[in-house]
């Protein structure tokens, strides 16, 4: 004897509701195996599920497509921030910039290592440090660093910050769309179960094959256990 299993994905839920709605409309409200109010609820929930799923797919696709552009901007910002720090440290080694000036950039007074910039947080932090440090140093009368200039570094850094903010907005949109879908699951699952129970009860006196065929038209999914013969 086959057993039924409720849909567990958004697409499967939409397909199940679609079949129930289409079969209900083909029969007419007088021949429905459940109350007409259940049918109207199915129509309403199907519309909500389709709209919510479409909005989620659009939001997710935008997020994925933007990720490539974001990574490029992060890579360029990292390149210029790192290069600026290297040039600054070389200037200190050559005696062109006083060692104590490193404090303005939050750089250690000992050693000449370039900070790790592999994370978003680190790049944001060090970008702010060197931009502020270079501004303060030059305002005190020191010559600015060229190749790269802080102005050029800032262009790529600001592009990265803007991209990061846009990425966060897109992620929030995707999360909100997913939450809307998630909030529909319990209601949709309960309605599908109600429809399935009513349909199976309505056709319970039919021969097995006729009963299964009639129930499948309403979107009921039947599965066979291993070794069972399909009807």
Image (tube, grey):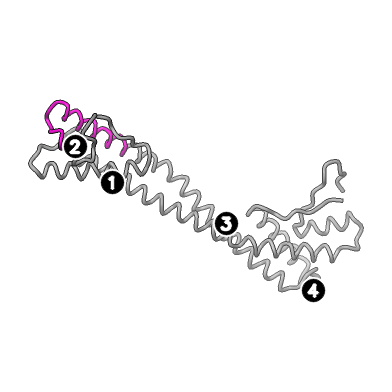
Q: Earlier in the sequence, mark 4 or mark 2?
A: 4
Q: Which residue is mark 3?
A: 53
Q: Which residues are magenta?
A: 77-102
Q: Main secondary structure of the magenta part?
A: helix
**Of helix, strand and loop, which one carries label 2?**
helix
Q: Secondary structure at mark 1?
A: helix
Q: Nearer the viewer, residue 81 or 91?
A: 91
Q: Are marks 1 and 4 in contact (CB under 8 Å)?
A: no
Q: Position of residue 25 (x, y in %)?
A: 73, 67
| Distance CA(mark 1)–CA(mark 2) | 23 Å
Give me the C-alpha separation between circle 4 and circle 2: 84 Å
Q: Is residue 81 magenta?
A: yes
- Ranked by sequence position, the earlier of labels 1 and 4 is 4
> What residue do we see at 24% from left, 30% from top?
86
Q: Mark 4 = which residue? A: 30
Is residue 76 rendered to the left or right of residue 137? Answer: right
Label 2 sits on residue: 102
Q: Is residue 179 magenta?
A: no
- Residue to which mark 1 is pinned: 158
Q: Nearer the viewer, mark 3 or mark 4?
A: 3
Crowding at mark 4 (Cα within 10 Å: few <14, some 14-19, many 20+): few
Q: Position of residue 81 (x, y in %)?
A: 27, 37
Disc 3 is placed on an element classified as helix
Q: Quadrant of residue 122?
A: top left
Q: Which mark is residue 2?
A: none
């Amino acid at each position: 004897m086959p057993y039924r299993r409720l849909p567990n994905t958004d697409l499967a839920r939409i397909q199940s509701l679609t079949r129930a709605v289409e079969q209900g409309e083909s029969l007419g409200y007088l021949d429905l195996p459940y109350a007409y109010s259940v049918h109207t609820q199915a129509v309403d929930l199907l519309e909500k599920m389709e709209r919510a799923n479409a909005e989620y797919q659009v939001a997710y696709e935008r997020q994925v497509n933007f990720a490539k552009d974001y990574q490029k901007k992060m890579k360029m910002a990292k390149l210029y921030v790192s290069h600026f720090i290297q040039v600054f440290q070389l200037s200190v080694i050559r005696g062109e910039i006083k060692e104590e000036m490193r404090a303005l950039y939050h750089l250690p007074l000992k050693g000449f290592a370039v900070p790790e910039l592999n994370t978003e947080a680190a790049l944001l932090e060090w970008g702010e440090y060197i931009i502020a440090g270079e501004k303060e140093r030059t305002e005190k009368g020191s010559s600015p660093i060229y190749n790269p200039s802080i102005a050029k570094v800032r262009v790529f850094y600001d592009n990265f910050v803007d991209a990061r903010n846009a990425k966060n907005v897109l992620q929030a949109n995707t999360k909100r769309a997913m939450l809307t879908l998630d909030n529909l699951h319990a209601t949709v699952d309960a309605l599908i179960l109600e429809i399935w129970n009513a349909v199976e009860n309505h056709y319970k006196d039919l021969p097995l094959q006729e009963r299964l065929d009639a129930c499948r038209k309403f979107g009921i999914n039947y599965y066979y256990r291993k070794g069972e013969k399909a009807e």
